[in-house]
Amino acid sequence: MLRSRSPRYLSRMLSCALAALLAVPTVVLGGAAPAAADTSQFRGVNWARLGDNFHGGPLVLHGLSSSDSYATVVAKANAIYTGFQNNLDANTVRLPINTYTVGTSWWNAYTGAIDAATAKGLKVVLSYWDDGVAASGGRIVNTTAFNTMWNTVVARYGSNDLVYFEPMNEPGGHSAADWANVVNNWLTARPSIPRHRVFVSGAGLNTDIKSMCADRRLDGTIVSLHHYTFFSGAKTYDQWVTFLRDAIGSCAARTVMDEFGAPMDTGLNYHDTASTDNFVRYFRATTEVLRELRIGSIYWPALGGKVTAGQGDDWYAMQKLHGTGTNLTLSTPNASGLDRLRYAWGLTGGGTPDPVSRLRNVGTGQCLDIPGATTANIQVQVYACNDTAAQRWTVTAGGQLTALAGQRCLDAYNRGTVNGTVVGTYACNGGDNQRWTIGGDGTIRSVQSGLCLDVNTTTLKVQLWACWGGDNQKWQVQNA
C-alpha cells in the first residue's frame, strides 16, 4: 500500500518513469489463453508488516518476531488465521515478499505463514514489494535478483493450487507498456504456472488495469486494482461509484481489488446512507460496486500496515491483535465496517444495517443500558428507557448484540460460564461469549454457556445466571 512517500522516493519514481524503458523482450503468445478464475471467490485481507511492507529488510509480519522458528510462525499464524476466518469469513490472505525475506534464513520461518494458511484451506496471494534491491522507486532495477527471488518462491509453491503470485506491488516506476513487458517476461519464464494463478498489478500504483486487461499477451491472468480516497479528491457517493466503475471499465470479470480500506477506529458509521463523510461515502460506494460486479477483494489491512501517528497500528486495520507469544486473538474495532466488507463479498444481503432496538427488561421495566454511553469496557445495567445511543442495540445475523455504531459487543466477560458472570461491552471478536440467542420465551441466552441474561434486582447490573423463568430474565425487543 502507498499511504505516503518521502520526497526522495517520489523524485526517484518520477525520474525512473521518465527514463528509457527497461530492456525486456516483447513476446507475443500464440493461441488462446485460459480464462481467468471467477474473482468473486476471493474474500481476503492483507496481513502486513507493522510499519508497511516497503522495507529494506526481511518482512516480519505484525504478530511475528524475527527470532521465531518455523513451528512458532505456524502456531502464531494459525491463531491469526482462525481470527480472520471466524471474525471476517475471509478465505484469502495476501502476504508480502521481498528479496530479503526470500533470500535469507528468515525464509525458512516465513514459509510457516504460507503453509499454515494453505493447511486451513485459505488462498494465499504472494506479492513482491519494492525493497531497494530488485526494485527501487517502483521499478525493477535488478532482474537477476528479481528472478532469483521468484524462482525460489515458485519452486516451493508452484504446484500448490491455493497459492497465487503477484510479480510486483504498485509498479509505479514503469510506464504501462514497460510494465506489461515485464509481466509478459515473468509469465514466459514460468510456463508451468497457470495464468489464473497470476495477479497482474495495474500500471502505476495498481490503478491502471485497463492497459493490462487490453494486452492480449496477458490473457487469462487476474488484474489487481488498488483504490483509496487519497488517490483522488473528495467525492459524493454517486461520484465514487462512477469513478470506480470507470477505473474497472470492461475488466470486471478479471479484476480483484487487492487493496482498499478506510478508518476503522475513529467511530465512523459505515451504515449511514446519509453521511457526508468522504470515507463513509467512499467505502459504501466501493463495497456496493464490488458486490454488484461480483469482483473479489482483499482489504488493506487486516493486521499491520502503516502506523498512524499516536497509534499502535494502521487506522485502517480491520482487526486488532491481542495476546503474547502464540496465544493470540483478534477483535473487530468497527462492526459497521465489517458489515460493509462482508456485503461486498456477498455474505450479507440488502446492504442496509440490521434493525436497531431497545431491550426492555420485563421484571424492572427498564432497558439494557451502557452507563454514560462510554466506549470503554464496562458492565451493562438496566436504566429508565430513553432514546440515547446507550440503549440502541443491533442484533446481527451472526447473533451479536452490538452498540455505539458497532464499536462494542455485548460480552460475557472472561468467557465466563458460571452464575454471576459479568456481562458488559467489549471490542467485537467473534467469540461465542459474544453471541446470543433471543428465545420465543423472552430469554436472551449466551451461546457459549447457555446461561440467561439476568438482572440483579438489587444493583440493576446485568449478569449471566442459570435460566429459571423469572421476569428479571425476560426481555422485550422494542423499536428504537
Image (cartoon, rainbow, N blue to C red):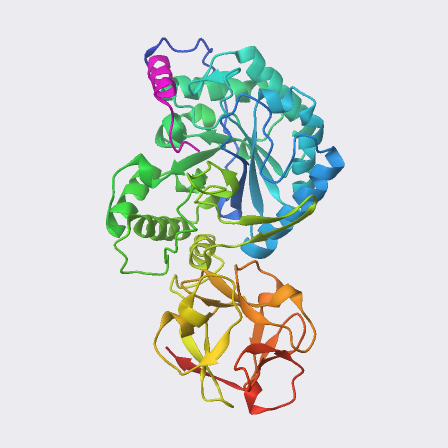
The magenta-colored residue range is: 1-17
At 44% across and 8% down in the image, what residue appears? 23
| Residue 175 x %, y % | 36, 19
At 41% across and 68% down in the image, what residue appears? 373
| Residue 390 x %, y % | 41, 71
Q: In the picture, which quadrant includes the C terminus?
A: bottom left
Q: Nearer the viewer, residue 389 or 44?
A: 389
In the rendered structure, the answer to whether residue 270 lies left or right of residue 342 reads: left
Q: Nearer the viewer, residue 425 or 303?
A: 425
At 47% across and 55% down in the image, what residue appears? 342
Tell which residue pokes out farthest to the right in this image: 71
The answer to whether residue 95 is visible is: yes
Quick check: 72 above or below 387? above
Q: Nearer the viewer, residue 260 or 466?
A: 466
Quick check: 226 above or below 410? above
Magenta segment, prevailing SS (helix, strand or loop): helix
Q: Quadrant of residue 21?
A: top left
